[in-house]
């Protein structure tokens, strides 16, 4: 039987991956690897200690360590014979790392790396997918517009450098760029990219938030915005088509403790879903690792993850630095109201 190794027993490792695995694979053996001792779960201080009793080839390793360590740890464990990975976002910290990742996936025999795909596994996002499919069935993407906002107050986590980053390009935007790529296809042009510092970190240019406008190859446009100094949490998608009379709006689950979503669509009653996208992703991932028939094709292919990560690395280098958050926030909240 496969054994799960969760590298990094922080918020992602313990609160997201472990909790979720307990629901979707209650009998799955799990060991945490973290230099910091853990009290109430099976724990070893490093991967050497794990291999004293287990073969690397029988492990599924979840990389939930701080962002700059993802690719170095992955490289070391591939060398040691691990072949199954779940990889947290951002999947790479530089273009060189992204190239390495692509090369490993292309060249290392039997290697499966499944980067976390959260929103594509949301039950509510199926409605957005259908909306896009129906729109594109009748025309190209001209007039198809996605607005997506993810907002929260990250002061405490940013001050502690949780996850190894304080940049808005690492926190919510990787999820947003992946969903935009997933729904609307490849991006041909970054029409606008701006970032700004948080009020508590004036020296840190992208600690407060960022905003992107993207033109997809099919003509569709995405507006992605994230505000890490917002008073309230918001995870919201709005798609419009044509002159705006056709629309679809999704309120994504606001946190791991509020696992429900809602969908509104022109002319239809509001729908609510119990929605745990990380459970759905991990269930699918373990199906692929166990090679169960019919479950092996990923909802999000690896090259879409590479596209989205590459986009974020490009815009974070090129984004216009806005000095204050206030102007940006006026724009952020100026998204269309429900029709
Ligand atoms: N998918 C999501 O929604 C989501 C949510 C939160 C975080 N994340 C990602 O997960 C990663 C971790 O974030 P977090 O918030 O859990 O961070 P965190 O700071 O809470 O935890 C990181 C943990 O990794 C441990 N660690 C550091 N180096 C290690 C090593 N070499 N080997 C093993 N363990 C090591 C630390 O001791 C700590 O316990 C980040 O890349 C972040 O972007 C993703």
Image: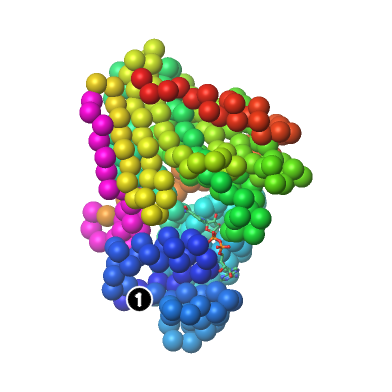
Magenta range:
268-294
Q: Is residue 289 magenta?
A: yes
What residue is rendered at 37% in x and 50% in y?
Answer: 258
What residue is rendered at 34% in x and 22% in y?
Answer: 247
Q: Quadrant of the N terminus?
A: bottom left
Element under disc 1: loop
Q: Quadrant of the C terminus?
A: top left
Where 62 sits versus 44, above or below?
Answer: above
What residue is rendered at 44% in x and 53% in y?
Answer: 116
Q: Is residue 34 magenta?
A: no
Q: Residue furthest front?
A: 231
Where 56 sits versus 238, above or below?
Answer: below
Q: Is mark 1 within 8 Å of ligand 1?
A: no
Position in image of residue 261 (x %, y %): 33, 42
Position in image of residue 312 (x %, y %): 58, 41
Residue nearest the observer in this picture, 51 or 210: 210
Position in image of residue 122 (x %, y %): 34, 45
What residue is rendered at 40% in x and 54% in y?
Answer: 256
The quadrant holding residue 252 is top left
Which residue does the numbered mark 1 point to in the structure image? 29
Within 10 Å of disc 1 (Cα), the crowding (few <14, some 14-19, many 20+) is: some
Position in image of residue 77 (x %, y %): 53, 70
Where 120 sits versus 240, above or below?
Answer: below
């Amino acid at each position: 039987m496969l054994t799960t190794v969760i590298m990094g027993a922080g918020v992602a490792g313990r609160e997201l991956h472990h909790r979720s695995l307990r629901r979707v694979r209650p009998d799955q053996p799990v060991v945490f690897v973290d230099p910091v001792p853990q009290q109430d779960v099976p724990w070893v201080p490093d991967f050497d200690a794990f291999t004293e009793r287990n073969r690397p080839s029988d492990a599924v390793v979840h990389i939930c360590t701080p962002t700059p360590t993802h690719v170095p740890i992955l490289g070391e464990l591939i060398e040691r014979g691990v072949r199954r990975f779940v990889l947290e976002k951002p999947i790479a910290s530089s273009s060189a790392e992204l190239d390495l990742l692509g090369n490993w996936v292309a060249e290392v025999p039997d290697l499966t790396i499944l980067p976390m795909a959260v929103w594509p596994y949301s039950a509510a996002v199926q409605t957005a997918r259908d909306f896009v499919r129906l729109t594109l069935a009748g025309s190209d993407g001209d007039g198809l517009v996605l607005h997506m906002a993810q907002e929260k107050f990250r002061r405490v986590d940013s001050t502690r450098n949780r996850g190894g980053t304080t940049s808005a390009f690492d926190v919510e935007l990787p999820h947003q760029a992946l969903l935009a790529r997933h729904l609307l296809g490849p991006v041909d042009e970054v029409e606008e990219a701006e970032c700004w510092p948080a009020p508590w970190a004036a020296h840190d240019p992208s600690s407060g938030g960022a905003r992107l406008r993207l033109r997809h190859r099919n003509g569709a446009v995405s507006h992605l915005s994230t505000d890490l100094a917002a008073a309230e949490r918001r995870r919201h998608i709005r798609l419009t088509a044509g002159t705006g009379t056709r629309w679809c709006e999704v309120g994504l689950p606001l946190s791991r403790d509020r696992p429900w979503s809602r969908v509104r669509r022109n002319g239809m009653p509001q729908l609510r879903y119990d929605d745990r996208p990380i459970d759905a992703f991990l269930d699918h991932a373990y199906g692929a690792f166990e090679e169960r028939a019919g479950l092996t094709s990923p909802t999000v292919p690896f090259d879409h993850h590479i596209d989205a990560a590459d986009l974020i690395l490009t815009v974070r280098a090129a984004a216009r630095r806005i000095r204050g958050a206030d102007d940006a926030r006026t724009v952020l909240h100026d998204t269309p109201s429900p029709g």
